[in-house]
Image (tube, rainbow, N blue to C red):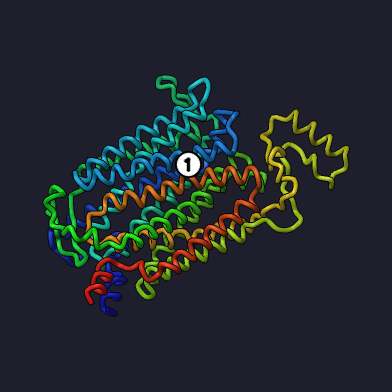
């Protein structure tokens, strides 16, 4: 059994490469196709993060009736679309060549990003057009289930953790490049240029979406020209031809599905839901929180949060590299447990403490530290100024009595979440793929992605409502409670979260 455990955690696949000493054509073709999946995940990540920091200021600019609560729905729309699409694309990939659902989904994604670039054109209800555009972008992103199932099915148990870490590293690279590109494109400004011929306003908000559409076109070409079908068993033996074979012709025993530990499957989905829920809360609230607490303008919030998210993405790559070494020594489950503990610390630090209060938007009308004459003068100056108002809006009642979150708290929390989230993310779906074993994983990965998408749907809605009504203290306290529940669930189901082949051997013994 010790040999099996060593085999389960062995990491021999170099980052982004296969075994360069092998001359086997099928092996090389398999790893070329896996790298296409890495690149697909990378571009999917870029396509999402390239606009995430600018959604809120763009929404405020195109529709003044939109508030922070509606922002939650806009961010959630992406995940809702992905949640609906993931099982469908997963089922499609189980019965047809993978390139079909991939090309279809990426085409939808490209079209939706172009739609997003034009949401300012309608004369009214612009916020609903943004909502629909983000929903379709998310629907196209349902191909994540296909990507994960392909990599899981095309790698042996020995290669799996490393391959999943590689894929997460590519996702993190996209996570870096997206906000960095958004920050770079912010120099265009809110006005930008107008291309009258195609009625397109090219500015700091629309340019990232159009760039994401260009990335999608490149992705389609790679999928069509390079991707081939491959499937191997847990020991790396080829069990599918290089080209497509109908699913019913694949020699998988009917008993395999019955042998899957369904309790472990449900537990893995629940843990993945919580992990994605937590990060969805973090990425949704970052821009409004920083604008409220640090009195940043819209442009500053886009630029600074873009830089912060890019740094977190770079940090994530280092975490993925470390995870490959640590999981080899200690196993996947301890890394997952440690990641949850680090995330808890990150949100606990973010709780507001002290006697310093945030600046109130327009004027510090309720701040008794100013003499009445200065307050009145400040209010008159603010109301007659064309300068963008900054600070915590007075209509959010909690701004008047909730202590401010300091920049040091915010940055420390960012750092800890940037350590804990990538570790939990890669370990959760690596464990999941090992639990499923040699069974074609398209549908199962579709449900896992749908679980994560459900979290990304509910997370933004949850935090936007709680944050707007009750403030950061309640919002982050509830998140700490949710992380505690996830840690207890992992501890309770710890012995059941093992690889299919290991569990099958234990049962036979």
Q: Is residue 55 above or below residue 503?
A: above
x 28%, y 70%: residue: 503
Q: Position of residue 240 (x, y in %)?
A: 14, 55
Using the image as rendered, state which of residue 125 and residue 310 is in the foreground.
125
Position of the N terminus, as image quadrant, is bottom left
Q: Can I make out residue 165 in this image?
A: no
Q: Residue furthest bottom?
A: 2
Q: Position of residue 95 (x, y in %)?
A: 19, 45
Q: Is residue 228 above or below residue 11?
A: above
Query: Looking at the rendering, which quadrant does residue 82 occupy?
Result: top left
Using the image as rendered, state which of residue 290 and residue 272 is in the foreground.
272
Instruction: For mark 1, give the secondary structure.
Output: helix
Using the image as rendered, state which of residue 320 and residue 204 is in the foreground.
320
Task: Give the residue at mark 1.
Answer: 76
Query: Looking at the rendering, which quadrant does residue 381 occupy?
Result: top right
x 67%, y 44%: residue: 295
Position of the C terminus, as image quadrant, is bottom left
Query: Looking at the rendering, which quadrant does residue 241 occupy?
Result: bottom left
Q: Position of residue 310 (x, y in %)?
A: 48, 52
Q: Is residue 51 left or right of residue 381?
A: left
* Picture mark count: 1
x 40%, y 34%: residue: 113
Using the image as rendered, state which of residue 407 and residue 286 is in the foreground.
286
Q: Position of residue 428 (x, y in %)?
A: 39, 60
Q: Is residue 287 above or below residue 253?
A: above
Q: Can I make out residue 418 in this image?
A: yes
- CA neighbours of label 1 inside 10 A, class few (<14), some (14 to 19), many (20+): many
Q: Is residue 303 left or right of residue 315?
A: right
x 52%, y 60%: residue: 483
Q: Is residue 345 left or right of residue 380?
A: left
């Amino acid at each position: 059994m010790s040999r099996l455990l060593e085999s389960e955690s062995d990491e021999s696949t170099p980052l982004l490469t296969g075994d360069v000493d092998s001359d086997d054509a099928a092996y090389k073709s398999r790893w070329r196709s896996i790298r296409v999946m890495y690149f697909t995940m990378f571009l999917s990540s870029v396509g999402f993060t390239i606009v995430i920091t600018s959604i809120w200021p763009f929404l405020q600019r195109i529709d003044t009736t939109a508030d922070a609560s509606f922002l939650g729905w806009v961010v959630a729309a992406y995940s809702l679309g992905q949640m609906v699409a993931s099982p469908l694309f997963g089922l499609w990939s189980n019965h047809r060549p993978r390139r079909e659902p991939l090309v279809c989904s990426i085409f939808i994604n490209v079209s939706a990003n172009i739609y997003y670039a034009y949401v300012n054109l309608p004369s009214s209800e612009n916020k609903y057009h943004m909502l629909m555009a983000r929903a379709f972008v998310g629907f196209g992103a349902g191909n994540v289930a296909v990507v994960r199932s392909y990599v899981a099915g095309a790698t042996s148990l020995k290669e799996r953790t490393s391959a999943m870490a590689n894929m997460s590293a590519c996702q993190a690279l996209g996570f870096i490049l997206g906000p960095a590109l958004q920050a770079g494109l912010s120099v265009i400004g809110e006005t930008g240029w107008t291309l009258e011929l195609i009625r397109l306003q090219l500015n700091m908000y629309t340019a990232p979406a159009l760039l994401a559409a260009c990335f999608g076109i490149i992705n389609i070409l790679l999928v069509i020209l390079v991707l081939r079908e491959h499937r191997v068993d847990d020991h790396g033996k080829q069990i599918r031809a290089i080209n497509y074979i109908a699913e019913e012709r694949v020699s998988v025993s009917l008993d395999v599905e019955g042998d899957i530990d369904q309790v472990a499957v449900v537990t893995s989905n629940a843990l993945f839901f919580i992990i994605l829920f937590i990060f969805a809360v973090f990425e949704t609230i970052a821009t409004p929180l920083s604008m409220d607490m640090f009195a940043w303008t819209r442009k500053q919030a886009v630029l600074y949060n873009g830089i912060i998210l890019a740094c977190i993405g770079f940090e994530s790559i280092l975490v993925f590299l470390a995870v490959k070494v640590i999981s080899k020594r200690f196993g996947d489950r301890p890394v997952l447990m440690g990641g949850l503990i680090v995330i808890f610390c990150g949100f606990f630090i973010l709780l507001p403490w002290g006697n310093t209060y945030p600046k109130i938007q327009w004027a510090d009308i309720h701040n008794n530290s100013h003499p009445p004459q200065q307050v009145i003068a400040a209010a008159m100056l603010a109301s007659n100024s064309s300068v963008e108002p900054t600070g915590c809006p007075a209509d959010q009642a909690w701004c008047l009595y909730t202590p401010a979150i300091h920049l040091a708290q915010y940055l420390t929390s960012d750092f800890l979440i940037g350590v804990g989230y990538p570790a939990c993310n890669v370990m959760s779906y690596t464990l999941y793929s090992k639990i499923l074993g040699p069974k074609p994983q398209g549908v199962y990965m579709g449900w896992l992605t749908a679980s994560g998408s459900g979290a990304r749907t509910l997370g933004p809605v949850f935090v936007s409502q709680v944050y707007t009504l009750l403030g950061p203290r309640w919002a982050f306290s509830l998140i700490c409670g949710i992380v505690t529940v996830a840690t207890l669930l992992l501890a309770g189901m710890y012995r059941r979260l093992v690889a299919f082949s290991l569990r099958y051997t234990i049962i036979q013994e």
